[in-house]
Image (cartoon, rainbow, N blue to C red):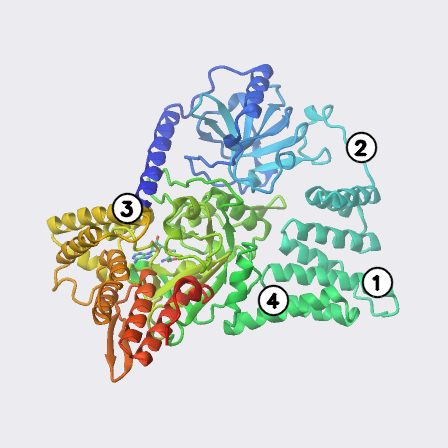
Amino acid sequence: MASKYYANCMENLAYDKKVLEAAEKRKGQKRRNKPTRLDLELNHQVFRGLRQESQIRRYRSYHEYPPSTTPMASLQPISISDLRLETHHCGRVLFVHTFGNPVLCMAIRNIVEDVNGDVEQLAVYNTPKTATLKHVLPGNCVFAIKEPFYEASEDGLYAIRVDHPSDLVQLQVTDALFPQKFLPQITEPDKSAIEYKVAGNAAFRRKDYLLARHLYTQALQLSGPADELTQILLRNRGVANFNLGRYEEAETDARASIVASTDMTDSKKVSLDSKALYCAGRAAYELRKYQEADEAFLSALKLTPNDPDTMREHNRCSRRLYEQSGGDYDFEQMSQSATKTHRLDHADFTSNVAVRSAGKRGRGLFACKDIKAGELILCEKAFQACFASECNASLLGEINTERGYFDAAEGLVFDTIDKVRRNPEAASRYLELDDGGYQPKCPPTLVDNTTVVDSFLVRAIILQNCFKCHNVRSSDHYCYVTPGSPDVEARSAGIWIASSYINHACVGNAFHSFMGDMRIVRAVRDIARDEEILVPYRCTDIDHNDVRKILKDIQGFECDCIACVAETKTPDAQRAHRTKLITDITAFMSAQLDRPGLPNKHHINRGKQLYRDLEKTYDGDNYKNVPRLGMIVLGSWLCGIQRTFVCAKETVHAAKAVMSHAGFHVEVKQGALVVQRTNACLDPCVTGIVVIAAHAYVQLGEIGIAEQFMVWAREMHVTVCGELRGFDKLYPKLAV
Ligand SMILES: C[S@@+](CC[C@H](N)C(=O)[O-])C[C@H]1O[C@@H](n2cnc3c(N)ncnc32)[C@H](O)[C@@H]1O
């Protein structure tokens, strides 16, 4: 399944490459036929009528050009007729007037004219899901396009494209650079600060926060430096910014609006200050600065004691601070919340780990203390996540290097660009993540009062670090079935900052699970202080060789864990034979899953034969103490099926063999279960096998041992699923 999906990704990449090659041939040329207004209007109508699929913001760019970091006033104007195809016009700025209505077709598009009356299509990419057409590219408005890129697209159309949101600046008639030529089209009567404020409030009431923010800003430019109106405008803009997710600006505005009146009898001022502190606290909370948020709420409570909203927020902060310091989460409640909403309200717990150099693996995450098997290593909320229900399925590719194709939702890229723009300070940790060597690096900078963010850098980081996550990691289902399903898995993806530093090992020492947008990492075996945390990036349900190929092609590295070393030492013919057997086993297993009722003797014998044949491909010396990853799934199935036909002793023997294939070497010594798991690979199937062994021990009358196996099974279930809920539904209780 995974391989088919991967092949599909590669096919798309090949198509994109062809398009790029065709476009490249026209680089530097001028467009042959100058379009008329009518041509463009007709084309624009076609875009409007396109079917639903095109109503997706899609990403297809072949030229990674940096965003403009030059102030607009220092750029030289250029006109449409001077634009060259497939060229990034550095040092230039194009002033245009939009004369159509915006449409969404892969990008947000409108038709534009320049000061000479020449016309062209303008396409704005990388806009967040929440951005409305009329906000991004409204009709009858004037824009400056900084350092424009002129594209010849694959369908014979042309467009001036904007990939970096800050390269598109909407101009007001009052702006010094507003082209006089467009003045007759744009009529904007002068307004006073009060009139802007009234218009801002009206926009706010309509929940048009973007417009409200703009109008309050206009009003602030006209109001006095510290008069009452200024305080009101700042507070109102703070709330508008909060609603826009611009938490850093919200906090700054809210704090700047505080009068700090010493006169506590002035109840109006006191109440307004309390509201400003409340807004600042909420913004700090959203920025995950819980201590700072709590201080703001406590200050607000001093002004307006017993305010129920502030009390509630203060209590919420206390819970987050508790989670953050000790990793004390209510995982059952977390899992229940995840069935209702994807975005969960929890703090991060990362104090068990630190980022350090990991040699050829680059940076890695290391344990700061000894961590016991099954213990929580870290728990973290996504910096940004995109869920299947919220965005269209899509694929991401790295056309220029022909690698890095990762089946993440494109929505994640757009929303992350937006998040980085809205909260650049908080995003600095995101921008420190591995970018796969992307050049040139352009950290967010403030130019012309706008945060400049390099969309291609944001995307490069996603390609290196994003992980697929399930909508809900529900342990009510046998979770191992869900991860392989591309339609679910490929469409939900996220970025977690601290855990992005975790490197891969097919046989790792940790395992991660997801609940909503929380990522939970637990230890598979005891981890010593200063040891590197390593998780398998991919499931082990496909041929290990396929996993290795995907890691190499997609992420550009070769794993050298013990299973990979053994794999590379296996002679080619033996390796090919194993691959063939695994293909047969996959077909056999899916036929068994589709078949109603229990398999008959013939099916079981076929399964046993495949199992024996596969076992022979793992030669003893090479695989001594190395997990035989291919054996686990079939071994688990056989063990589960056969237990009804064979005696308890044989079941225990078969179960222990499968555990040993997964790297768990189990012994019972003087009534105590001893599990040696130095090289263990936590495959979710193993939990079921441990439960089978427990039941077999009950039949053998060894209740104490059976109970110890059950304790271990529960621990594994928590490591795989994140929490215990569902274990009792999945596995029968011991009949003691
Ligand atoms: C999510 S990042 C992990 C953190 C990264 N090492 C860093 O320096 O930020 C994934 C990247 O780390 C590197 N990496 C992860 N596991 C590796 C391994 N087993 N061997 C070599 N490189 C690895 C690869 O470059 C991969 O694309």
Identify the residue position indicated by label 2 in the image: 189
- In primary-sequence order, the first of circles 2 and 3 is 2
Camera-near label (2 vs 1) is 1
Q: Is residue 594 left or right of residue 239?
A: left
Q: Amino acid at mark 4?
A: Tyr
Residue for badge 1: 269
**SS category of the residue bearing label 3:** helix
Q: Quadrant of the C terminus?
A: bottom left
Distance of label 4 from label 3 (alpha carbons): 52 Å
Camera-nearest label, 2 or 4: 4
Image coords of residue 596 (percent x, y) = 33, 48
Crowding at mark 2 (Cα within 10 Å: few <14, some 14-19, many 20+): few
Whole-angstrom CA distance, mark 2 to mark 4, is: 45 Å
Of the two numbered discs 2 and 3 in the rendering, the one whose residue sits closer to the viewer: 3
N-terminal label among 2 and 4: 2
Which residue is drawn at the image coordinates 73% and 35% (left, top)? 174
The picture quadrant where one finds residue 673 is bottom left
Callout 3 amino acid? Ala
Determine whether label 2 and label 4 are within 8 Å by CB: no
Q: Earlier in the sequence, mark 4 or mark 3?
A: 4
Q: Position of residue 351 (x, y in %)?
A: 47, 71
Q: Residue at x 49, y 43 (%)?
A: 455
Cα distance, mark 3 to mark 1? 73 Å
| Label annotation for residue 290 | 4
Q: From where the camera sits, is residue 119 visible?
A: no
Q: Amino acid at mark 2?
A: Pro
Q: Earlier in the sequence, mark 2 or mark 1?
A: 2
Q: Secondary structure at mark 1?
A: helix
